RNA sequence: GCGGUGGUAACUCAGUUGGUAGAGUGUCAGCCUUCCAAGCUGAAUGUCGCGAGUUCGAAUCUCGUCCGCCGCUCCA
């Protein structure tokens, strides 16, 4: 059932111009998708909703748009060069995949544990007279275990540093590491997976011209911290927001647009006084949840604390959405401490500090990050909106309609203009003239093909919240019917009122007021 | 990458023991329609993922290859 919903979302997306597989005429490109005519409208509206909620609604948040190409040292400072470089190995029998370095580290831990056990046993045996320090230094078994652990650790570090995959494999073989569940030692070669895409700048050969496509937009904000703070005269606490593409060379990109190799992030980094970060962390948790709740039912949203934290965070929580394939991360809220600014200060030699006039001292601000996946947001909106429902047809019999119940402020097309009949020139002319006026206000569609009911259904399928129908009464008194998508109810209004009514009901302002 | 599974029209799919391709929906043109899909007439669209082999003949059998989906790993 849920599985079916997901399939329907994928095919509906393609069939109605929301999302196409990328490079489809060449059989597609794994993990890459294109946004179609309605997709780009919806995506732009999601971005606008985010931007206005974050930038327009907060005096102390400003936006930037930093370049995708950045100085390679940025990714050294951020930890991505080291942390996003995973050597992976597969077990041929269990078909499971492991990080080679983790397997070896686990083995090192086992050796150290064995040494400790020797010490414990000796302590019991010798009782009070036990000289632990001496025992550790002299007992042959303890020394051997510790020495071996140290050797392996050193070799592991070297292999990782030199990207020596063959030596990692050799270590796994020499240590006779077995797959934890099955005990199998039947391993494939160790392969390197770098999660950052690299490219070349200019025509410099070798490593000198090597650049990465940014794996997150956040670093563009951190390296502009000083610029923005100066030019906007912001005082702590303040934030910098950015929407932009990021790239990760995922081992496997799966679940449609949920995990793509090229994706778009909507990130805001909020700079705060050290010690106040948890307060702000909680504030942003609540604010971000309110933003989601304004367009998504509460039961589809939940917080999920991170079990183990990334290298830069001292607190982290996800906002998850109930996708057809389960609750999954939509947005991450991290307390990033001063990791990034401190790291950039150190590597660049530029002091990324803030002088706090209240405290009369300099400090490196702490950072609270909110980061939403734009494409995931898009998918959540679609999963929430796509509904097949039973409604009465012209004869009062049951019929099904497929409708996208998207929040009107996010809907790709706001209004369709439909002459009741196509073969009556007066109706068509009148409808055309109404369409030509409405198009100045919002995105409209004109359609006179097929019976009126079918045209309503077509608009339902792309989530158009309002349909204006021009009928014979229009010709008499300049009134039209407005049909609302979800209720299918109609009201009759004067032509002069249409732009105002549709504008009001599809205005993003209502959403913003709701979450203020 | 490994394993499983699949690839036939824009979408969903059928195609029987090999005889050179079909349905429904959708699209387009026209007609008809005074408000909620499936009324009438007509039309377009497929090198049956690609390549090779077996065969008189391959969507169907064999091999190779590409791509998709699901699982393993990672994250927005």
Image (tube, rainbow, N blue to C red):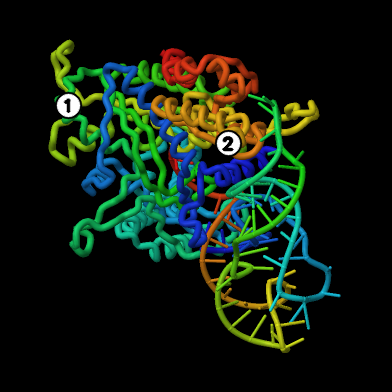
Residue A89 in sight = yes
Q: Is residue A276 above or below residue B44?
A: above
Marks 2 and 1: in contact by CB < 8 Å? Answer: no
According to the picture, the residue beneath numbered tag 1 turns out to be: A353
- The residue beneath circle 2 is A448
Neighbour tally class for label 2: few under 14, some 14-19, many 20 plus, Cα within 10 Å: some
**First in sequence: mark 1 vs mark 2:** 1
**Observer able to see residue A103:** no
Q: Nearer the viewer, residue A406 or A291?
A: A406
Q: Quadrant of the C terminus of chain A?
A: top left
Frontmost residue, A285 versus A157: A285
Q: Position of residue B8 (x, y in %)?
A: 65, 62
Give the quarter of the image for residue A499: top left
Q: Residue A356 in the image: x percent, y percent? A: 17, 16
Picture coordinates of residue A251, whole percent (x, y): 47, 53
A281 to the left or right of A118: left
Question: Which residue is the extreme one toward the top?
Answer: A358
Q: Nearer the viewer, mark 1 or mark 2?
A: 2
Q: Chain of mark 2?
A: A
| A77 to A30, vertically: above or below | above
Q: Residues within 10 Å of mark 1 (few under 14, many from 20)?
A: some
Kindly identify the residue that appears in the image at 16 percent across and 30 percent down: A227
Q: Chain of mark 1?
A: A
Secondary structure of residue under mark 2: loop
């Amino acid at each position: 059932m849920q599985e079916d919903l997901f399939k329907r979302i994928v095919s509906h997306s393609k069939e109605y111009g929301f999302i196409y597989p990328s490079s489809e005429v060449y059989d597609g490109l794994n993990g890459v998708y294109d946004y179609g005519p309605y997709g780009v409208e919806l995506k732009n509206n999601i971005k606008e909703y985010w931007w206005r909620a974050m930038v327009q609604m907060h005096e102390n948040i400003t936006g930037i748009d930093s370049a995708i190409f950045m100085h390679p040292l940025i990714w050294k400072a951020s930890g991505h060069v080291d942390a996003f470089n995973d050597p992976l190995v597969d077990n041929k029998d269990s078909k499971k995949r492991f990080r080679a370095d983790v397997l070896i580290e686990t083995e090192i831990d086992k050796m150290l544990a064995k040494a400790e056990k020797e010490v414990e046993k000796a302590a019991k045996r010798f009782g009070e007279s036990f000289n632990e320090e001496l025992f550790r230094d002299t007992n042959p078994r303890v020394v051997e275990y510790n020495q071996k652990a140290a050797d392996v650790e050193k070799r592991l570090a070297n292999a990782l540093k030199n990207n020596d995959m063959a030596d990692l494999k050799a270590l796994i073989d020499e240590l006779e590491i077995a797959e934890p569940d099955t005990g199998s030692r039947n391993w494939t070669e160790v392969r390197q997976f770098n999660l950052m895409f690299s490219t070349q700048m200019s025509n410099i050969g070798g490593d000198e011209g090597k650049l990465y496509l940014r794996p997150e937009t956040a670093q563009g904000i951190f390296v502009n911290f000083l610029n923005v703070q100066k030019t906007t005269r912001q005082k702590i606490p303040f934030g910098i927001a950015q929407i932009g593409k990021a790239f990760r060379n995922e081992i496997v990109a799966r679940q449609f647009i949920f995990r793509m190799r090229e994706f778009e992030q909507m990130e805001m980094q909020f700079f705060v006084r050290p010690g106040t970060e948890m307060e702000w962390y909680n504030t942003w948790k609540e604010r971000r949840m309110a933003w989601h709740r304004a367009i998504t039912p509460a039961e589809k949203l939940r917080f999920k604390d991170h079990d183990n934290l990334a290298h830069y965070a001292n607190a982290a929580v996800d906002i998850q959405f109930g996708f057809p394939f389960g609750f999954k991360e939509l947005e991450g809220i991290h307390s990033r401490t001063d990791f990034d600014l401190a790291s950039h200060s150190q590597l660049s030699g530029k002091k990324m500090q803030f002088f706090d006039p209240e405290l009369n001292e300099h400090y490196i601000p702490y950072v609270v990050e909110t980061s939403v996946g734009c494409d995931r947001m898009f998918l959540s909106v679609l999963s929430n909106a796509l509904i097949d429902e039973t409604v009465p047809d012209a004869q009062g019999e049951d019929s099904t309609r497929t409708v996208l119940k998207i929040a009107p402020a996010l809907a790709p097309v706001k209004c369709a203009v439909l002459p009741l009949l196509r073969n009556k020139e007066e109706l068509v002319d009148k409808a055309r003239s109404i369409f030509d006026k409405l198009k100045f206000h919002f995105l409209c569609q004109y359609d006179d093909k097929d019976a009126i009911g079918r045209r309503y259904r077509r608009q339902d399928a792309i989530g158009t919240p309002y349909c204006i129908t021009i009928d014979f009464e229009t010709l008499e008194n300049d009134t039209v019917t407005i049909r609302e998508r979800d209720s299918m109810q109609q009201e009759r209004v004067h032509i002069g009122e249409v732009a105002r009514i549709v504008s009001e009901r599809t205005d993003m302002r209502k959403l913003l007021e709701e979450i203020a």
